[in-house]
Image (spheres, grey):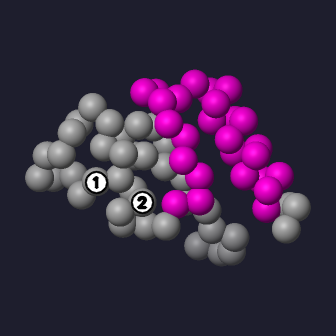
Amino acid sequence: MPEPRRVVALGDCAVGSGILGDPSEIVGSVEDVLPVDLRIPGCPPTPDEIATALIGLIDEREAT
């Protein structure tokens, strides 16, 4: 994947296991496996929350 790469943990389950708890099939949050650039909690997150978070990530990248 070309640069810049961004990893987004979308939803409570990706951010921190959520309602699924700790079954043996789940390693944990995405951050336990990959470095995460953006965490968007919610079950599920609303479209507005997703759009706002992604725009914030883009604005942050352009500022640097």
User: Dot 1: what SS?
Assistant: loop
In the picture, the disc for residue 45 is none
Task: Assess whether residue 52 is covered by the magenta stretch.
Answer: yes
Q: What secondary structure is marked by label 2?
A: helix
Tell me the quarter of the image containing the C terminus: bottom right
Percent across and percent down for residue 62 are 86, 61
Q: Are marks 2 and 1 in contact (CB under 8 Å)?
A: yes
For image coordinates 52% across by 60% down, the residue present is: 36
* Rendering coords of residue 63 (x, y %): 88, 61
Give the residue number, with chain letter if any, for mark 2: 31
Q: Quadrant of the N terminus?
A: bottom right
The x, y position of residue 35, in whole percent, is 49, 67
Disc 2 from disc 1: Cα separation = 8 Å
Q: Is residue 19 magenta?
A: no
User: Which segment is the magenta one?
Assistant: 36-61
Q: Is residue 51 rendered to the left or right of residue 62? A: left
Q: Amino acid at mark 1?
A: Gly
**As drawn, 8 above or below 49:** below
Corner quadrant of residue 2: bottom right
**Residue type highlighted by circle 2:** Glu
Disc 1: CA contacts within 10 A as few (<14), some (14-19) or many (>=20): some
User: Height in image: 55 above or below 46?
Assistant: below
Mark 2 neighbour class, 10 Å CA radius: few under 14, some 14 to 19, many 20 or more: some
Q: Which mark is residue 28?
A: 1
**Side (left or right) of 9 relative to 50:** left
